[in-house]
Each structure stands twice: as structure tokens, then as C-alpha cells.
Image: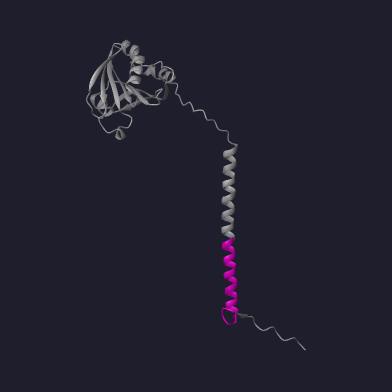
Amino acid sequence: MSKPGRAPRVVAELGRPETPQETADRKAENSRKYRAQKTVNNLVLSLIVTVAAVLLIVMLVPRNDNPVDRSVDFAAVATQLQPSVDEPLAVPVLPEGWSTNAAEWRTADAVSSWYLGLVTPEKQFIGFSQAIDANPTWLAQQLLSQAPVDSVQIDGITWDMYRNPAPTADRGNFDEALVTTAGSSTYLLIGTAPETEFEVLARVLAASIANNQ
């Protein structure tokens, strides 16, 4: 005599036994939820592993709190350029505390120039340009079409002085500037440094400019 079959389980939510389709649907839904949870767990685990790896790299990489010296050997650059330039290029001997972060030959508006980007002891900026056969358009663009406000003589060289009348926040790298000419060169100092540091640089350049007159 065979045992009677087990009565179908009554599902509380339904108040009756599940149909075969409902059972299949329930199992499919449970499987979907399991896979979704597994995916989230894997993502969280991957994120934890990635963060741990980054922290480990940061801890292992040696750090140096000293400022990085990015000075450019502008004298060597000038030596390479000089054979192709008729005018003698100014190569200043910078005082202690000054550095150069750029040294290059530029061409703009058909005017070529020898350019140095200088960082002063006060951590301000002065750009030096020696433009060959500069035209008024080139100079006006450098000085935002400003007119000179004064002139000053430094170690025998007369410079025209320019100031940027714009609000401080709108001046960029042009607070003031000095301009002089010698031979076929126009010498421009422009930047954010105080007048005393402009004067220091003008004195350093004086001999080179005088030799080109």
C-alpha cells in the first residue's frame, strides 16, 4: 500500500498552495535577487581592495618636503640660439634667490624674441623679452596698449615705465613693465614683482644692453 502524497504547502501570502508557475516565478525571483546581491558585494569588495592598494602605494612612495628645483639652464639655451641670431642675446647673471622656469625663442606677429620666465626671491614673476626688430603692434600687445607713465634711468640705461590700470584681479602677469631699446633689440621686463626687483633685474641687464648700443 503506497503512502499518501504530501499535501501542497499553503503559502501564507496567498492563503492557498502555490501553482507550479508561481513556484517557478518565486524561485526565479530569488535567484535574481541573489545574483544582484552578489554583484553589489563584489563591487564593494573591489572598491575596498582598490582603496587599500592606493593607500599602500602612498605609504610606500618616498616624499620630499623640499621644493622642487625647476630652474632652466637658460645660458645653454642662449648658446644654442646665438649662432642663428644677429643680435647679441642678453644672458643675465642672476643674483642669489632668482631662478628661471622658461627659456625659449618665440615668434609672434612676425617678431622673434628671446624670452626668459624669471621667479624672484619674493616668489613673484618677471618675464624678460629681447625682441628683434619689434614693431609697434608687438609691443602694444605685450603691454595691452598702455602708454608709458614715466621713465627711469638705471645704471645708465633709460627705461620707459608702464603700469596696468586694471583691477588687481584682472591684471594677470602684468602689474608693471619696463621697456628700452638698443641696436635692433627691444628689451621688455613685465610682471608682478615689486619695483625693487624690477630694478635689480634692470641692473643685471645693463651691461648687455649698453654693449648693444
Total numbered badges shown on the rendered structure:
0
**Residue 144 within the segment the image draws in magenta:** no
Task: Please provide percent x and percent y for residue 73.
Answer: 45, 21
Task: Please provide percent x and percent y for residue 28.
Answer: 58, 71
In the rendered view, tell whether residue 195 sits above or below residue 169. above
Q: Quadrant of residue 55?
A: top right
Residue in front for this viewpoint, 24 or 201: 201
- The magenta segment: 12-37
Residue in front for this viewpoint, 63 or 108: 63
Residue at 57 percent of width and 43 percent of height: 54
Name, please, the residue furthest toward the bottom: 1
Side of 206 relative to 96 (left or right): left
Task: Please provide percent x and percent y for residue 146.
Answer: 23, 27
Name, please, the residue furthest toward the right: 1
* Overall secondary structure of the magenta section: helix
Q: Quadrant of residue 141?
A: top left
Side of 76 relative to 189 (left or right): right
Q: Quadrant of residue 191?
A: top left
In the rendered view, tell whether residue 18 sits above or below residue 58. below
Q: If the image is split into quadrants, where does the C terminus sit?
A: top left
Residue in front for this viewpoint, 200 or 190: 200
Residue in front for this viewpoint, 42 or 185: 42
**Residue 22 within the segment the image draws in magenta:** yes
Q: If the image is split into quadrants, where does the N terminus sit?
A: bottom right
Side of 111 relative to 78 (left or right): left
Q: How is the image coloured?
A: one colour
In the rendered view, tell whether residue 167 sits above or below residue 159. below
